[in-house]
Image (cartoon, rainbow, N blue to C red):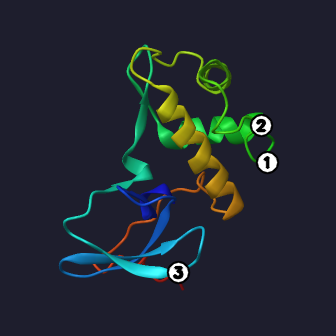
Amino acid sequence: MLKTILSVSGKPGLYKLVSSAKNMIIVESLIEKKRFPIHARDKVVSLGDIAMYTQQGEEPLKNVLSSIKKKENGAKASVLPTAKPEELKAFLAEVLPDFDGDRIYSSDIKKLIGWYNLLIEAEIDFEAEDESVDEEGEAPATE
């Protein structure tokens, strides 16, 4: 499911991939539920492609989000994205004990918590396996 959830540089929040065309994609805001185009010149990253640095390498974002969900019993994060850097790092240490403190900044943890809260509010099942997506951005039809 995270493959179809996108972060767009310069735009707040997260977006769900609706469709794609030659030089743009159509996304829907998880916050406002409004659809609009994102052009090829915009920097777009799928949450499925993001990982967080650990002492051993990298941990996929999906695993980190699942760990937060388990810690919070499926509720929104108990730490606000606006918390002090020490609180943010302590929170991350609970859900990702071997995170690399030299390469993960407070701003990264704020973004992680904000994204987690958005996904919970939008009732996105980020733990579900990603389905394949065809060239038009549509998931295959199931019978």
Q: Amino acid at mark 3?
A: Lys
Q: Is residue 54 above or below residue 36?
A: above
Q: Which is in the foreground here, disc 1 or disc 2?
A: 2
Other-residue count near label 3 (Cα within 10 Å), few / some / many at <14 / 14–19 / ≥20: few
- Structural distance between the alpha carbons of marks 2 and 3: 28 Å
Name the element at disc 3: loop
Q: Amino acid at mark 2?
A: Ser
| Quadrant assignment, res 84 | top right
Question: Viewer-proximal residue, 120 or 42?
Answer: 42
| Quadrant assignment, res 39 | bottom left
Q: Which residue is mark 2?
A: 78
Q: Is residue 50 above or below residue 24?
A: above
Q: Is residue 89 left or right of residue 142?
A: right
Question: Viewer-proximal residue, 70 or 29?
Answer: 29
Dot 1 and dot 2 residues touching (CB under 8 Å): yes
Q: Is residue 66 above or below residue 10?
A: above
Residue at the spot 58% in from the left edge and 56% down from the top edge: 128
Q: Is residue 19 above or below residue 48?
A: below
Q: Which is in the foreground here, disc 3 or disc 1?
A: 3
Q: Which residue is mark 3?
A: 34
Q: Which tag, 2 or 3, sits closer to the chain's start? A: 3
Q: Which residue is mark 1?
A: 75
Quarter holding the C terminus is bottom right
**Percent of width and height locating residue 68:** 67, 37
Residue at the spot 67% in from the left edge and 25% down from the top edge: 91
- Structural distance between the alpha carbons of marks 3 and 1: 25 Å
Residue at the spot 47% in from the left edge and 15% down from the top edge: 101
Q: Amino acid at mark 1?
A: Ala
Residue at the spot 77% in from the left edge and 37% down from the top edge: 78
Name the element at disc 1: loop
